[in-house]
Structure formats: C-alpha cells, structure tokens
Amino acid sequence: AGKLESAKSAVRHVIENRRAGDDFALFAFAEDEVSLVSDFSPDPTRLLRALDKLEAGGRTALFDAVAATPTKMMAGRNGKRAILLFTDGVDNASKLTSLEMAEILQQVSIPVYAVGMKNAAFDRLTDEERKDLALDNLKMLAYSSGGQLFLASGEEDLKPIAAKINGEVRKQDLMGFAPSGRGELKYQVVVVS
C-alpha cells in the first residue's frame, strides 16, 4: 500500500477507537488550499466515505495548510482538539516559511501530531535524500504546537502510533482565564501542581 492508503488506515484506526462524545472532521490540502472534506460529526460514516474517495495530487503547501487548519477546527464542539497530520513532510508551494508557521502554531494551542510517512527504504537513504523528507520541518511543526513527531514506514507502524496519539489527546487538560484587557498580548506562565 502507498503512503496515502497507509494514512487512511491509520485514520480508520483512530476512528474505530473513538469514545462517546468524540467528533471528527477531515481536512485535505493541495496547492494553496485547505478544504473541509467532511465536517465535524460524532457519526464517522460521512468521514469514512469521504476518506475512501481522497486522492493525492498537486503541489504541497504544507506550512500554509497547517497554519490555516486551527481556525477551521473551532467548529468542533469539543474543547480538546488536535491535528493529526499524515505527510511526507515535503513543502514545495507554501507562501509561509517554517518559522512563520511555527509562530502561528504557538499562538493557537492546538497540538499537531505529525506522522512522517517514510518508505521502507528510509534507513538506506543518504543524508540529502532524508533532508528531502523535511524531518526538521516536521519536528518544528510538532514541537512548536505541543504535539509530537512520529515516523512510520508502513501500516504496521501506524496502528501503535494512532493508539499513542489517541492516549495523548485524552490526557489534555483545558484551562482558561479572563484577561484584564489591559497591556500587551503575551503568553502567561501558569504553574499547576
């Protein structure tokens, strides 16, 4: 199976392990557009049908797509949100740089779990070929958002990765505060003990 088919299988695995109250949406990106393929719903039937029809194509504006997705996710009804990104990490069409994307992700508080889809020959690649997989970009993307990076060579790697991501998302805690509305907008340090 190709990378897209393996990613579809991992999405199915995540959905199979859903709990009551979970809702999912499916976004796809190609060229300079992020499109909603299946809207948020606790019933995954439409999402799974749409997933089956997804095809790869076009150039990849990865940074632009990831930066645009969090605002689209506000339509979901759960406070716990995460982006599961299945990609080879190649970006050949973004207007944003990786640093600009990282800045945006730091501001939205939605973790990105990047699953780098490598092929079985990854370990035999030269350093230059590995660089083409843009692992540094995927690391920045995941870590700047509070998520994690995983590498998968095939379907056998994806089920345990999907299970780990599922567990991580369930551990999220939500905290909020009401800002005074005075002074500059900046991150606040919060200590929980």
Image (cartoon, helix red, strand yellow):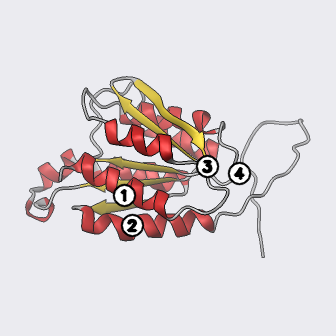
Q: Mark 1 and mark 2 in contact? Answer it, CB < 8 Å.
A: yes
According to the image, label 2 marks what residue?
Answer: 161
Q: In the figure, residue 121 lies in which quadrant?
A: bottom left
Which residue is at 27% across, 35% downward?
A: 55
Q: Earlier in the sequence, mark 3 or mark 1?
A: 1
Mark 3, residues whose alpha carbon is within 10 Å: few (<14), some, or many (≥20)? some
Q: Mark 3 and mark 4 in contact? Answer it, CB < 8 Å.
A: no
According to the image, label 4 marks what residue?
Answer: 79
Which residue is at 79% across, 36% downward?
A: 184
Give the residue type at disc 1. Ala
The location of residue 29, given as percent across then percent down, is 38, 32
Task: Give the SS element for disc 2.
Answer: helix
Q: Earlier in the sequence, mark 3 or mark 4?
A: 3
Q: Marks 1 and 2, how far apart in space?
A: 8 Å
According to the image, label 3 marks what residue?
Answer: 42
Circle nearer the viewer, 1 or 2 = 1
Q: Marks 3 and 4, how far apart in space?
A: 14 Å
The quarter of the rendered structure image containing the C terminus is bottom right
Q: Is residue 73 left or right of residue 91?
A: right
Q: Earlier in the sequence, mark 2 or mark 4?
A: 4
Circle nearer the viewer, 3 or 2 = 3
Which of the pair 22/109 is nearer the observer?
22
Give the residue type at disc 4. Gly
Which residue is at 45% across, 39% downward?
A: 99
According to the image, label 1 marks what residue?
Answer: 10
Relative to 64, residue 180 above or below: below
The location of residue 158, given as percent across then percent down, is 33, 64
Give the residue type at disc 3. Pro
